[in-house]
């Protein structure tokens, strides 16, 4: 007998203390509601679909916040952590090995999930970090100060590389005039950012430059990528979701809005959050009206509507929970060690064991080879060691060479992707 397909859940959280609601995407039934939870946008993360993490908004007038862990089958908080500052944005890597938090004071925090250890913390922005995204070993952070920064995690996690780097970040972008609200990454090291300045901007993470700037008639609070094509969805404060092509050049003669292919509109209030299914056939949106809508992207119609709360929905996710026996979850450490310094130990960047190569995704294949080579070098399984000895310096030099080759390949891939993008508005 064939096993039933894995259950897909739609998750939603609110800045009001209405909990994290989970609905069965197939039946529409509410499965569970995790309480308490009051999270600001981009502060909800599924940790490799094994458990849920949510950064809590501080109470009114307060300057402290917590991070809650929840098990899928239990409504109450499993573990509560107390970071050094309130976390505004939360992100887990694909394997669920690390949690990355963006703080209200502009700091970034990187924790190891298995132990709760704070591996590294650093000052990233002048104001609060509003959103985070990962592409391979590149971390992208967007801030309330309007800036976007790209961080090489290989450099961030290696003390010697940090000392040798000219700047702590790989790239810094300052083209947004108002706070950055969301960031998403696409194949070919391309990132899309949204802002209160009524634009979405497309960036090359390999070339370190802006590729396009797309104007909208309203501020954009959220973006989601269609994995099937070079199209993304932009959630507007006017209640519309704009279907937007990434490949229309801003110098084209089609007008300022020539990149906008159409809209999804259900007469809602501001669209605060978006999530796309892995096949791109479904899009989930959260709104200030307290509703969660599931869209069929082919018919562009709402197929389900869930009522979450009276307050605004700030986060939506689509997950397939893995109900496995987890080892005990550990609270996240507030400092790196007793003296506030990083303890010397090896850190291996995660690489998916069951990674399925995507046709044309040369960067992932290259990165896989890159990690293999570095792990083999010198007969050691350690990529990074903050207590490097002389013998390991050669591995550092080898890593620098590989990073250079990686960026060269990214340049070629970005141009290949852009050449395949549509150059005019679809009928």
Image (spheres, helix red, strand yellow):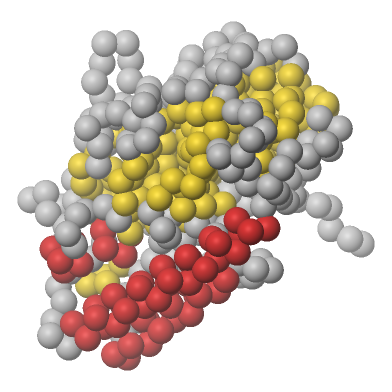
Vertical arrangement, residue 249 with respect to residue 290, above or below: below
Q: Which quadrant of the figure contains the N terminus?
A: bottom right
301 or 327, nearer to the observer: 301
Evaluate whether residue 99 shows in this view: no
301 or 333, nearer to the observer: 301
Instruction: State the residue lying farthest toward the right.
Output: 1
Evaluate whether residue 425 shows in this view: yes
On the image, the x and y values in percent for residue 230 come to 66, 48
Q: Quadrant of residue 161?
A: bottom left
Residue at position x 39%, y 31% in the image: 176
138 or 303, nearer to the observer: 138
Q: Which quadrant of the figure contains the C terminus?
A: top right
- Specify whether 4 is left or right of 229: right
Instruction: State the residue lying farthest toward the front.
Output: 253
On the image, the x and y values in percent for residue 412 come to 52, 68
Residue at position x 86%, y 32% in the image: 299
């Amino acid at each position: 007998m064939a096993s039933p397909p894995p259950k897909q859940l739609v998750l939603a959280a609110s800045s009001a203390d209405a909990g994290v609601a989970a609905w069965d995407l197939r039946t529409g039934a509410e499965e569970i509601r995790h309480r308490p939870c009051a999270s600001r946008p981009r502060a909800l993360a599924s940790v490799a679909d094994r458990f849920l993490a949510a950064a809590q908004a501080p109470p009114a007038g307060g300057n402290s916040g917590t991070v809650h862990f929840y098990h899928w089958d239990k409504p109450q908080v499993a573990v509560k952590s107390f970071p050094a500052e309130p976390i505004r944005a939360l992100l887990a890597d694909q394997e669920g090995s690390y949690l990355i938090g963006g703080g209200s004071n502009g700091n970034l925090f990187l924790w190891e999930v298995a132990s709760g250890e704070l591996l590294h913390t650093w000052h990233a922005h002048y104001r609060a970090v509003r959103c985070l995204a990962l592409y391979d070993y590149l971390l992208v952070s967007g801030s309330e100060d309007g800036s976007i920064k790209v961080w090489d995690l290989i450099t961030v996690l290696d003390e010697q590389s940090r000392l040798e780097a000219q700047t702590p970040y790989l790239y810094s972008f300052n083209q947004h005039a108002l706070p950055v609200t969301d960031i998403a990454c696409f194949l070919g090291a391309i990132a899309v950012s949204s802002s209160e300045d009524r634009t979405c901007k497309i960036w090359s993470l390999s070339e370190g430059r802006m590729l396009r700037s797309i104007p909208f008639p309203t501020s954009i609070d959220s973006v989601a990528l269609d994995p099937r094509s070079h199209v993304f969805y932009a959630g507007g404060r006017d209640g519309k979701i704009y279907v937007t092509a990434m490949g229309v050049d801003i110098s084209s003669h089609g007008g300022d809005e020539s990149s906008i292919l159409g809209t999804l509109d259900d007469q809602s209030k501001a669209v605060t959050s978006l999530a796309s299914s892995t096949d791109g056939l479904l899009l989930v949106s959260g709104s200030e009206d307290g509703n969660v809508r599931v869209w069929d992207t082919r018919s562009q119609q709402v197929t389900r509507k869930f009522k979450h709360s009276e307050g605004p929905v700030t986060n939506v996710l689509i997950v397939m929970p893995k109900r496995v026996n987890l080892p005990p979850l550990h609270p996240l450490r507030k400092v790196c060690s007793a003296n506030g310094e990083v303890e010397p130990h090896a850190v291996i960047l995660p690489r998916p064991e069951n990674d399925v190569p995507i046709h044309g995704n040369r960067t992932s294949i290259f990165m896989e080879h890159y990690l293999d080579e570095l792990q083999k070098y010198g007969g050691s399984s350690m990529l990074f060691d903050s207590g490097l000895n002389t013998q390991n310096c050669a591995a550092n030099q080898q890593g620098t060479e590989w990073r250079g080759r990686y960026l060269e390949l990214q340049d070629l891939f970005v141009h290949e992707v852009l050449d395949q993008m549509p150059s005019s508005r679809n009928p």
